[in-house]
Image (cartoon, rainbow, N blue to C red):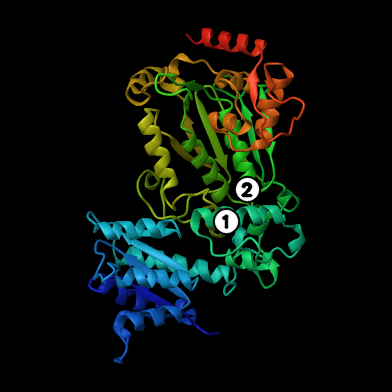
Amino acid sequence: MVKKKVFISSVQNEFAQERQALADYLRQDVLLSVFFEAFTFEEVPANTLSPQKVYLNEVKNSDIYLGLLGSDYGYEDEKGISPSEYEYNQARIERLQRWIFIKDVANRHPKEQALIRKIEQDVSCKKFTDIESLKKAVYHSCIRFLQQKGFIDTHEFDSSLNHQATLSELNDDLITDFVRTAKGKRNFPLKESDSKERILIALNMFRNNTLLNSSLLVFASNPQKYFPSATIKCAHFHGNTIQKPIPDYKEFKGNVFSMADETVDFILSKISLSTGARNKDNIVETTYEVPRAVIAEAVINAVAHRDYSSSAGIQVAVFKNRIEISNPGKLPSELSIEDLKVPHSSYPHNPILADCMFQYGAIERYGTGTLDIFNLTKERGLKVPEYTIDGDFKLTLWRPSSAADHLTDHVTDHVTDHEPIGNYKDIDDPAHRLVFVMSGEMSRKELMEKLDLKHQPTFRENYLSRAQKEAYIEMTIPETPKSTKQKYRLTQAGHALKNQLKNERK
């Protein structure tokens, strides 16, 4: 086979030692030397072309762009752009694989910071501290690339071929929605009109004219046809222990995005919600006792990193004092539980699936999800989340009721202009919750935004339909139920219920 050319780029006066060490590593490693050919600045022969044209031509003729980013932005031309940024832009135009490694440094040039922010919106980035950690991270990227391209055998679930499924199994609407969203979120290079095959190839989900397992998890109408355990089971308990009968139990199926949305909405429907005052705006702000972003990160991490080859599924349990999210899986050997609390590189169990979720915007940046969970709960004043590994990988998010006296302190500091969360009892009934947040006439979209819900079928079934059935709300245009101008308002019974709920929480 023809070796894949790796263009190693950095500011010319920075990382000279690292560039040479990587080139030597790719050439000397018994496995990597078979598949990769390294190229560095220093190896350009003398010629009459300008250095910039030479480098850009080398990028065009490469298969992989490997960028090292640190403290310096480098030489700037008359447009204020450095050669490194030109090279990255060219790699993006050529749709090359882009492997970006960022050194953990104290100070960065403002333009280097801006370049890093720009690149992080396009691709996942890894961090390194020294040459050894850099070589280790590059090795992982190389092996992942070889597995995705089928150059070496792999037993990883999401990159394995599925010989039973055909392209007809994939939902056209799901693919169209993905391309539209990924283009807006990450500048995904393809169009909605492109063929399924081309889109899947760009996502590394189609190899040897065969679908990969990951493509079915994302785009199949019924992934559970092939992976029955790829579900999320959610249960709600009124106390702090598992007791029967279970007050509410749901098992969510479908593709990974719909399951994640439904699970987040389930959890939000079981935890306390506070509303703000109208002293600044007629629109009342709502705040969940555990930040929605924390819950979403926790669910997405479970979906992206679980072991899909296991017959066990993801399980969510909402207790009075905590939320537990468990999934069959384990930490990669490179990470410990303590590493999750600080900036760290990402080693996803399902790299193709994780990259697809990144392109869709479900994952904002690689390696930051767990850190965000710790930071956001700390800002809210909640008890520190706990990760445990005992057969399954479990995250425990603590609700305010687990530390009531600690909650009293943080409410004053962090929820200004809001009535204290601690003054609100749990509103278990979703229909009551909908009534509680309504004001005036509101559209379905406005109501979902007020409740911070994403999955429309769940909202209709658990909130809207139940509130209408109980005659707490009514349509403003009842003669045309499906009107695009349809809104909802409280009935007399709804106003009475809302007043009752407010009085109970005074």
Residue drawn at 55 percent across, 48 percent down: 329
Q: Earlier in the sequence, mark 1 or mark 2?
A: 2
Element assignment for label 1: helix
Mark 1 residue crowding within 10 angstroms, few (<14) / some (14–19) / many (20+): many
Image coordinates of residue 260 in percent, x first then y, are 60, 42
Q: Quadrant of residue 107?
A: bottom left
Res 165 visible: no
Label 2 belongs to which residue? 256
Residue drawn at 40 percent across, 23 percent down: 280
Numbered circle sitting on residue 166:
none
The answer to whether the residue labelled 1 contacts the one labelled 2, judged by CB atoms less than 8 Å apart, is yes
Q: Which amino acid does the dot numbered 2 rest on?
A: Val
Query: How much space separates mark 1 and mark 2, taking CA atoms?
Result: 9 Å
Numbered circle sitting on residue 353:
1
Res 336 visible: yes
Q: Is residue 137 left or right of residue 315?
A: left
Residue drawn at 70 percent across, 22 percent down: 466
Q: Nearer the viewer, residue 347 or 367?
A: 367
Q: Quadrant of residue 102?
A: bottom left
Mark 2 residue crowding within 10 angstroms, few (<14) / some (14–19) / many (20+): many
Query: Which residue lies most toward the bottom here?
Result: 47
Image coordinates of residue 367 in percent, x first then y, are 42, 51
Q: Quadrant of the N terminus?
A: bottom right
Residue drawn at 40 percent across, 28 percent down: 382
Q: Nearer the viewer, residue 250 or 74?
A: 74
Image coordinates of residue 19 in percent, x first then y, are 31, 74
Image coordinates of residue 198 in percent, x first then y, are 64, 68
Q: Which amino acid does the dot numbered 1 rest on?
A: Leu
Instruction: Name above or below for residue 278 compared with residue 222.
Output: above
Q: Is residue 388 left or right of residue 446?
A: left
